[in-house]
Image: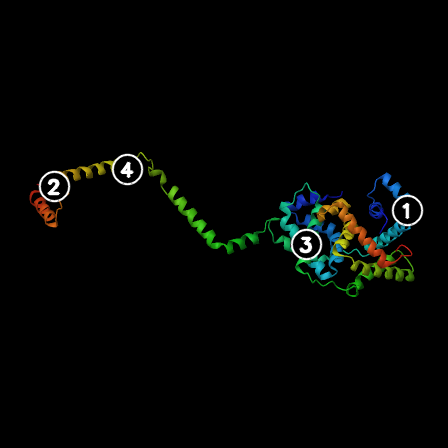
Amino acid sequence: MTVTDAELIKAYKKGDTQALEKIMEKYKTPIYSYLLKMVGSRDSANDLFQEIFLKFIKNIQSYNEEKKFANWIYTVAHNTVMDSFRKNKNRYIESLDQIKGEDFKSVAETIASKDLSPENILIKTEISGKIEKAFEILSDEQREVFIMRHYWGLSFKEIAEILKVPIGTALARMSRALGKLKVELGHIEEAV
Amino acid sequence: MNCDYSEKILLYFYGETDKAQTEEIKEHLNSCEECKKNLEVLSGVSNHLDASKAAAPDYLIEDIIRRSRKEEIPGFNIGDVLKNIRNHWKVAASGLVFAALMIGVFFPFGADKVNLNWTSNIDSGLDSLEYSMYEERDSFLGEYGESGEDFKYEDIDSEIESINENGRIL
């Protein structure tokens, strides 16, 4: 039986630390993937991931259980990233060369697990590299909507609520991002 | 993107359109190369994002859990409370002293034996003392008059002598 977020939060409020572990287990991928794409550095992503969950632990008593937990923790994640951007205006985003080692490996592993030929893996890896590079030219706002929609599975309405902008703005940001990516990538011959 | 459907394509791709909108967009895609390209790019980027998903390392999670255990009650940080007391110990000490004083005043040991009633005999005793003082004053003024006559130390000395000799004021 799947335990809901609300049940886990209730258990954790009563002091059950295993519930906390389960919550983090559930959100470790969407939040960490978002952080990596936003800050571009594993060290920064690690720091921010800890900061987000320590904020969660500290403020759990004030969390209103009537609200959807996912949206609450995602809002905390978004605010934490924005704060870090404000604090480090000249932040250093690791170049693709520094992080692509692991990312490329993960892409290759994913594709290899589908038993594709080595040539295909190479092609797909190259395309992934192009996409990754194209992502770097997007503004933080454009990249964020893309990532939220994809990694968090939120609707545009929910994204707009987290960003505190009208839904039209959220859609326009993503639309502009897609336009930039299309120009940067040219035409992708085959689906990756 | 110049086509009016650019945002609708996003909603369509992520399944946020209703049946009628979906049909409308499908029809549009048959004739719009730009939107077809957009869908291709979207699909390619989506696959890339799926492939580059990453989970937070286990040691990070273990560290957060370890740190959370230091907090006795979730959301209630005893460390913060102690830190606040350390930072404001003077205020805290003053508060304690004041509280102790208040308890001492209003709830003294053996307080049940003390009559603090305002209509107690203390009040009437004070009244009689005051009354006798007025009587004494009147008799003194009656003797020397109320003319504001100044009397000197020698007068007082002679009064004392008279008292000593006769045991009463002459």
The residue to which callout 2 is attached is B144
The residue to which callout 4 is attached is B122
Are both tags, 1 and 4, on one chain? yes
SS label for mark 2: helix
Task: Please state which amino acid type lies under the numbered disc 2.
Answer: Tyr
Task: Please state which amino acid type lies under the numbered disc 4.
Answer: Ile
Q: Nearer the viewer, mark 1 or mark 3?
A: 1
> Image check: A48 left or right of A117?
left
Crowding near pointer 1: few (<14 within 10 Å), some, many (20+)? Answer: some
Task: Please state which amino acid type lies under the numbered disc 1.
Answer: Leu
Are both tags, 2 and 3, on one chain? no
- The first of marks 1 and 4 along the sequence is 1
Q: Nearer the viewer, mark 4 or mark 2?
A: 2
Residues at badges 4 and 3 in contact (C-beta under 8 Å)?
A: no
Residues at badges 1 and 4 in contact (C-beta under 8 Å)?
A: no
In the foreground, B147 or A123: B147
Q: Nearer the viewer, mark 1 or mark 4?
A: 1
SS label for mark 1: helix
The residue to which callout 3 is attached is A80
Mark 4 → mark 3, Cα distance in angstroms: 70 Å
The residue to which callout 1 is attached is B29
Question: Which residue is drawn at the image coordinates 25% and 36% (left, top)?
Answer: B127
Q: Nearer the viewer, mark 4 or mark 3?
A: 3
Residue A43 is situated, as x and y percent measured from the top left of the image, at: 71, 62
Q: Chain of mark 4?
A: B
Residues at badges 4 and 2 in contact (C-beta under 8 Å)?
A: no
Residue B8 is situated, as x and y percent measured from the top left of the image, at: 83, 45
> Image check: B153 left or right of A137?
left
